[in-house]
Image (tube, coloured by chain):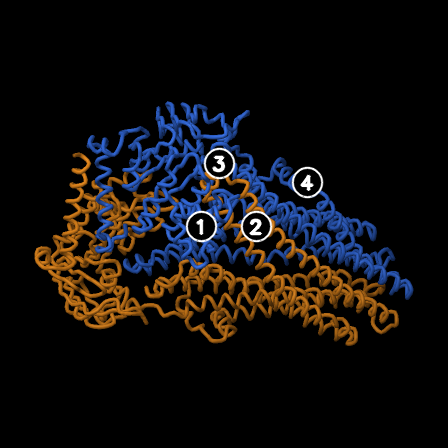
Amino acid sequence: MSLHDFDEEEHSGRVTGRTVLRILAQARPHWKWVLGFLLSVALVSFQDAFFTYLGKQIIDEGIAAGDRSALLRIVSLYGALILVQAVAVFTFIYLAGVLGERIQYDLRRRMFDHLQELSFSYYDRTPVGWLMARVTSDTERIAQLVTWGLLDSTWGLLNVFTAMVFMTIINWRLALVVLAILPILLLVAAQFQKRILAEFRAVRRANSRITASYNENITGVRVVKALTREEANLGEFSRLTGDMYRSSYRAAWLSALFLPAVQMVSAVALGSVVWFGGVQANAGEMTIGGIQAFIAYITLMLWPIQDLARVYAEMQHAVASAERVFALIDTRPEVVDRPGASDPGSVRGRVEFEHVDFFYEKGKPVLSDFSLTVGPGETIALVGPTGGGKSTIVNLLCRFYEPKGGVIRIGGHDYRRLSLQALQSRLGIVLQTPHLFSGTVRENIRYGRLTGSDAAVEEAARTAGAHDFIVRLEKGYETQVGEGGSLLSVGQKQLISLARAVLAQPEIFIMDEATSSVDTLTEALIQKGMEALTAGRTSFIIAHRLSTIRRADRILVIDDGRVVEMGSHAELMRVGGRYYDLYTRQFRRHLEREYDLLKMVGASA
Amino acid sequence: MALPAPQHAFDLKQTISASRLVGLWRMLTGFRGAYLLATLSLGVAAVSKTGTYLLLRRFVDHTLGNAEAMASLPWIALAFVGLALFEGGFTFLSGRLAAFTAEGIARRLRDYLFDHIQRLPFTYHDRTQTGDLIERSTSDVDALRRFFADQAIAAGRITLLFAVNLSALVMLNVKLGLFSIAVVPLIVVLSYFFFRRVSKAYEAYQEQEAKLSTTLQENLTGVRVVKAFARQAYEREKFDRDNWEKFRRGRRLLRMHAFFWPASDVLCGAQLLAGFYLAALMTMDGQITLGTYLAYAGMVVWLIFPMRNLARLIVQMSTGVVSHGRVAEIIKVEKEPLAEGRHEPVGPLRGEVVFENVAFAYDGSGRVLRDISFRCEPGQTVALLGATGSGKSSLVNLLPRFYEYTGGSLRIDGVELRDYPRHYLRRQIGIVEQEPFLFSRSVRENITYGVGREVPQEEIEAAARAAAIHDVVVGFPSGYDTLVGEKGVTLSGGQKQRVAIARTLLKDPRILILDDSTSSVDTETEAAIRAALDRLMEGRTTFIIAHRIPTVMRADLILVLEGGEIVQRGTHSELLSQPGIYRQIYQVQARIDQEVSQEVDRVLT
């Protein structure tokens, strides 16, 4: 998928049969609702036409005939039908609406469930915002098509149809006159809508440019002022608003012209009806009520025709949305359980990387021929420059990705023979930027083991060194952490994610240490928590802290997808190579922080 | 219609009023004639529509069945078309004029807000969120546009239709006319309350939608945690709860609509039918003619049904009024006058800067700077050293008059700073920040941004070479035309800084303000930036916000700030010879060097 696919510009797809069918299929589980609203819409449309017919009957059978009892009969029928109509209107609004909401619910659920299964490689190349738009706005468009789109077109067609039927019943020759005008109406409407929609698209484009321009000028206001760009910026901005003005104004007056234009065509129809109708009435072939009814039917036909082009444009949007949604649903996860995948009951054994090759993009290898054997209970520190492959090693171990070549064995088994659940439920992972979910502190720790009791949660927090700060929070363990944990400091979030990993009682522990600095006390607490976690567990740590590095059983310097140096702290220092440089630089930074030098000079990091 | 020139002549500040309605009325300044005409046209259109029914009455009563009058049949048919033309023409005119007004007002407002915001003082921008400003400049402006374009005009249309048709009906028959509107007040009141409740239910629905989005976003951004703990099932359940709640709230909203529309249909329908019945009886009794009956049946529809929408419009219009208030809050704020100032030299400054007991405090808060006195000759370099919050940035921010000093005297070239127009000062002062803000434009446009003249390519390249960025730029896919930012290349902090240096070289200011970066650039880049900065500083009075001793060492004057005061001053050698913060920093740095070598020795021996 190239970056271009994520462009949020105009989307309108060709209405293709297959996609439309698949969209309609979304309504199949709720076919009773669909049937219900289509029937009620048909009833409403028919009755609307019938009301007009009754209006004619009042004139012809009642007034003109001077028949009071007939009048009362017609009026009573009319009144009864108003009640029936109310029920029908209620039914179609309710059913169509609920169906729409339900289809959205179904689609969102399906997409969300599917997203949980998709592999990391998918998330790597797909922006979160793009996914969000699929789950939110696209589902809405699809639901609109299945409900209001279907409703509008059914209602529209039926209106035209029933009106024509009733007109034919009243006077077929006049009905033919109207029929002749119908195509002209359609043509006029289509032409107008095409132009109006084009202008609206231009308005939306201009609008997003204007918003971007506001955004940039406000966030960069310091530079604007410093470089005295105010005049020039206003000039540029004014051109944007000029574009917007032109399109918006044109769209508005085209819309204003549209209705009268359609009405003009129908007025011609009306004029002809009066003319021919008048002649015929005098010849006794047309009643006064009949003429009145014709006028009403022409109006009745007008509404759907006005809307036709809009409905079609919305259909195009919905189809484009549906294609994106279906593409997401059809994406197969890359890492899945193989047939016959088993759970060995434990993953405590030896971890072996054998000649592992890996790349995210073809032609850009990240790991090549990487081999490493880690004994049970060993703590491995991975150090080296960003992009060197440290995270990749860890991601492969977690089976977020699988090797493109070579084998990874855990306890002697090729880990692709294990089920994902067997491996991943026994891993404890702490990420560099700790991610918390909205909710309480307790809920976030319990994420590590959902069945953990309150006592277990607190025990884990104690082990991780998080308990003390948690009880000092206003509501203790019941404190809300805010969206993404925004109400806590970085250090606090790290402690909570450590506690979460402790509670999970993992067999293999993986940690990507944070680079951001925390205060000395928190640092010591984190250190203590890590010691508790790594004790007796096979551990892989992408290390940034000196103490972590020094304490590791083995240090691996990773660069360019290879192990450049390997050994204990003392061994590697003696080598005087990459590790030596890295360590002394880190040590200097550590001291600068220790002595508050950075604070003295007001530097940020 | 020609595009009107941007009307900056009218200062929207004049529209500010304690009364929101008065404010809206003043917003119409310059468009009142057009808007009045739009309203009048609506009246004409309404009269034409009613005229059609009156013509129908004449046609039925006098032409039909009258052999002598049959000759006038074509004329009557033509008159129908004519009236429709009249109605359509004026409807269009009204729509066009309303669009002209609304789009014109919106454009004027957009331009005004854009310019106003970029001229608001820093004290305003410091405490205002960008998102909020953008929201007000876009959504609220659009709400105002809709207010003038659709809502006010539609409410006017409904009112006029009601007034014209009611007068006509009363003219035809007083009793019938008054009887027909019995239910109207009830409909207006009922629907008003209904739409108020609906807008509340809609808010609840949107709230849930926001919540669902948050849950989704947290899941997608935290997908690593979800997978790391194999919590897919748990996440599904969590999402489903929010998803279902949205469905439930949507259903509730629909239920309200599903009840309201048919219920009001029944009310309107009953009124209509009762009117038909009464009118039919009166026709039979000879109180009114058949033609009158037909005209009545046509007009009464326009009397009753539109009233349902009147209440909806009133509810919608209240959001327009609120939006106007939100926009007015921005307009109310005073902007900083850029051109105001007694002393504007023709040529550039020399660059002699004298601070004498300068003090600065933000409105209402404690002092930020106190008793700042020092002097620097043209071309000299002043280094500022101190912890975060010591007042370094505030001090340099006074020079371009980003903030106004609140005490003492600050002179450049012997003239009080306040007497220089802000524009002049800012053209004479160049600023290179630690991580400069670049605009989403091409590299070329970013380099020439704010230079205020056409710059030939050779000159741009020369500046880029001097700033050590040329080689980087030509490596980009489209060289100098490469877009910077989200839609183009992402520049590193060091690269951004060098673009800013090139930009400042072209600007050629007499006074420079530099932020000496400690952001993690590698040693090679650091040397390049250093050399570029040296070239930039040549022959200019320079203020450096310094973060490390090597930068400071060469300055002509070093000022050490603490708590908004100068605690130490002098050259490097002077400051080293006296006790104080400066020596402390120097010593800490020396000690760190020593400890690093000790650590290395400790491991190696």
Secondary element at image label 2: helix
- The alpha-carbon separation of the residues under discs 4 and 3 comes to 37 Å
Please state which amino acid type lies under the numbered disc 4.
Arg
- The alpha-carbon separation of the residues under discs 4 and 2 comes to 24 Å
Of labels 4 and 3, earlier in sequence is 4
- The alpha-carbon separation of the residues under discs 3 and 2 comes to 26 Å
Name the residue located 39 percent from the left edge and 34 percent from the top edge. A537
Where is residue A19, by image quadrant? top right
Numbered label attached to residue A484: 1
Left/right placement of residue A305 relative to residue B345 reads: right
Chain letter, colour orange in render: B
Please state which amino acid type lies under the numbered disc 1.
Gly
Is A50 rendered above or below residue A16?
below
- The alpha-carbon separation of the residues under discs 1 and 4 comes to 38 Å
Secondary element at image label 1: helix
- The alpha-carbon separation of the residues under discs 1 and 3 comes to 23 Å
Q: Chain of mark 4?
A: A
